[in-house]
Image (spheres, rainbow, N blue to C red):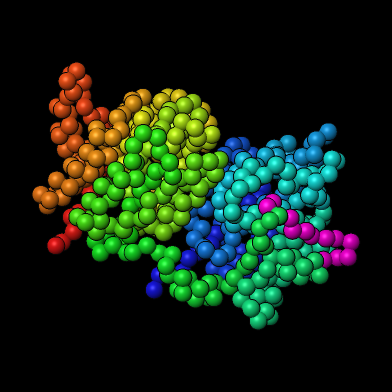
Amino acid sequence: MEPRLTPSALIVSWLDSPPFEPLRSVLREHYGYNAIPLQLPEHNREQVLKRSLSNALITHSSMINPFILYLYGDSLKRQGQSRLLLKNGGNSVFMDWLKLRQEYIDKLGFNILVILDCNHKIVQTMVDRYPILEDDMDPQSNSIVQVLVAPEFSKQNGTPFAHVLADTLREVTMSSSSATIDIRDFVAEVQRRLEPSSSTEIFSLRSTRENLMLTAFSHEEQVISEDIWHYPRISKNTSNYVRVSVLPITWATVDGWDAESELQELTDVFEHHFDFTVERVVKIPNNSAAHSYLQRRINEQIKWVGPKGLLIVLYNGHAKRTNGGMILFGTSDDVQGVNWTQITHTLNIADCDVVHVLDCCDALSATKGSETVQSEIANEANLQTGDSEYHGKNETLAAGAREERVPAGKASSMKVFAEVLNEMAVKNIKITIHSWQQWIVAKVGRVRTQNGDLRYAEPHYKMNPLRGDPSPTLRLEIRDI
């Protein structure tokens, strides 16, 4: 039987000793949550929070229970604006709640319960109050985002709101005949325990979506075992890994060539000679939901592969290097592409080993370079992956350099990748990503057109992090026949 999926909660506070332990205990014991505490620093707080969110979401593995983000602390109103500022007591250090929600939460693609526990009453929208639901940044998303707002004064008769939540959740769980609790029913029970003059409310960012549900983890296990279709086929040969997964990615529509068929040539080699688990081709929609769709799919795959696994990501499509990052796109008409630099950071900090195989223009731009080069690729510091953040081996086979256009069709790199890997597998030798790249260079490096130009792009190999003593090369072992 598959191990139970573990939902995650990120409990954020400015304080050294916030009153969270009872709530963390209930979430852990009754719902199987991994409740992660985070004390925000006075400096770089938004970067720290975003990184912590990213890391917590990677560990969030639940088809049923939502990701929980609990924000605890003081707050104030910015004069002349309807803005709620989360802050550290009398300190001038603060975060803009609406900006935080729009930039970090709206686009995550997960079902999320946000709990705002601060010292000021928040309403849905008023000119002179603190709006929490204005301007959804991803209105087409299928994810559910609900915000539970604590009473104006967090303590009820000296009891922290987090304790009220914990007591209510424990009692409802133990007394309910059903393992599943509707979040609005839960909030109604919380309200019954508050003083008459106080109130707590639940707001839905996307009003057309249903309510979030909380399910006790023992029942979640049963549901998961019944829905085992969620898991891809487990490969017979995983070498030293618990799982090895190949994730092919392209677009629903690609200008110029049949990108999906080229991917199929390479995935056939992986499946036949290595018996790796090959996922269905991910077809990114050619619309404004492209980035959130792919980010969500990558997050799901990282969770499934797990900390003792290997994820091989294949991309075949268009790309271009910009100051904001490496942007993937399918057609020249695409109004919004995918910021692959942002998604690469998610892959870089994953607990599993990761191999990137990229057939697109400017392909090497997806990898971490020197700080100078990386700053040219993406100006935002939070897109740079620090060496200490890499948890697994991380290697890249790129069709071309950072600023190099590569051919498609008959001279495409993906076809050569597949052909050479098949030749190496037939010879029954041990294969590394680096040796794969070297064989490709040896095979196509001398093939020229009638004009004397190289017919194929020369692939590049990269290992991250950039250290003087590189990690051992990731090896792909041939299946026993």
Question: Relative to 310, does residue 33 appear above or below in the rendering?
Answer: below
Please tell me which residue lies in front, 222 or 452.
Answer: 452
Question: Relative to 302, does residue 364 appear above or below in the rendering?
Answer: above
Please tell me which residue lies in front, 81 or 46.
Answer: 81
Q: Position of residue 96 (x, y in %)?
A: 70, 39
Residue at 82% x, 34% y: name it: 79
Q: Is residue 221 left or right of residue 71?
A: left
Question: Relative to 64, does residue 470 appear above or below in the rendering?
Answer: above
- Please tell me whether the stretch drawn in magenta is mainly helix, strand or loop: loop
| Magenta segment | 194-206
**Rendered-image quadrant of the N terminus:** bottom left
Please tell me which residue lies in front, 279 or 99.
Answer: 279
Q: Position of residue 337 (x, y in %)?
A: 49, 36
Residue at 63% x, 66% y: name it: 213
**Rendered-image quadrant of the C terminus:** bottom left
Q: Residue furthest top?
A: 451
Residue at 21% x, 20% y: name it: 453
Q: Position of residue 455 (x, y in %)?
A: 21, 27
One can see residue 79 in this view: yes
Q: Residue furthest right?
A: 197
Residue at 35% x, 48% y: name it: 248
Query: Looking at the rendering, which quadrant does residue 437 occupy?
Result: top left
Q: Position of residue 351 (x, y in %)?
A: 40, 52
Query: Looking at the rendering, which quadrant does residue 30 occupy?
Result: bottom right
Is residue 207 shown in magenta? no
